[in-house]
Amino acid sequence: MSEKTHWKKLLDYNYLGSHDLEPGERREIEFISVNHETVHNPRTNSDETKVVAKLKDEKPMILNSTNLRAMELVTGSPYKEDWTGCKAIVSAEKVRAFGGIHDALRIDTNVKSPAANKAKKAQLETLTEKHENWGKVSAYVKGQKGKPFEEVMKSIIGKYKVSPAIKKKLKETHES
């Protein structure tokens, strides 16, 4: 059987769309930047301001509110600046819109970007002895004597940035 060509590929589209993917294809994309841009709408013959993602080795992608929320889930951050370098998986899905059923490009929220942990860590507070939760954290560590220290630290590192000096103090607390 010969390869088939989607009719939308015959038109000059400047932005990544569902027509750029093969049926069932899931494509990895990498974000370079996300900004407002003026985009020409050929249906209305007018210019509109849209959120556009510049992608590595791909056409740019217009992000609607569904895909913007998906990027927050994928990256772990609501800030577009944290999305630079993040990777996501896109696929075409059937959606109800504009009075009918259409193919739409969707970002898979079940696949987290490796940069998501970096973005999340950038938002964490730094734990110090003067931090308002220092007493609670110390008490928690002291109460976990039956568990290996590194296992106890995993839950703390998921909530705070921890310097080597603070880690040493917490280890002393765990062992005392």
Image (tube, rainbow, N blue to C red):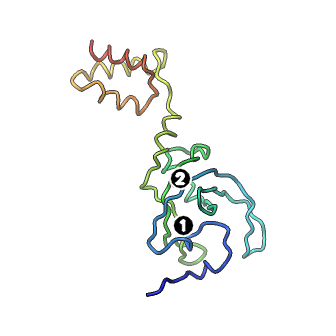
* Image point (77%, 66%), residue name: 47
Q: Is residue 71 above or below residue 161?
A: below
Q: Is residue 77 above or below residue 50?
A: above
The amino acid sitting under disc 1 is Leu
Q: How many marks?
A: 2
Q: What percent of the width, then of the height, locates residue 136?
A: 38, 21
The circle on residue 153 is none
Q: Quadrant of the C terminus?
A: top left
**Farthest right residue?**
46
Q: Is residue 97 above or below residue 162?
A: below
Q: Quadrant of the N terminus?
A: bottom left
Q: What percent of the width, then of the height, locates residue 113?
A: 47, 49
Q: Is residue 83 above or below residue 142?
A: below
Helix, strand or loop for disc 1 = strand
The amino acid sitting under disc 2 is Met
**Residue at numbered disc 2:** 71
Q: Earlier in the sequence, mark 1 or mark 2?
A: 2
* Image point (59%, 59%), residue name: 57
Q: Nearer the viewer, residue 40 or 137?
A: 40
Relative horizontal placement of residue 43, taking residue 73 as reference (left or right): right
**Residue at numbered disc 1:** 105
CA distance separating discs 1 and 2? 13 Å
Q: Nearer the viewer, residue 88 or 109?
A: 88
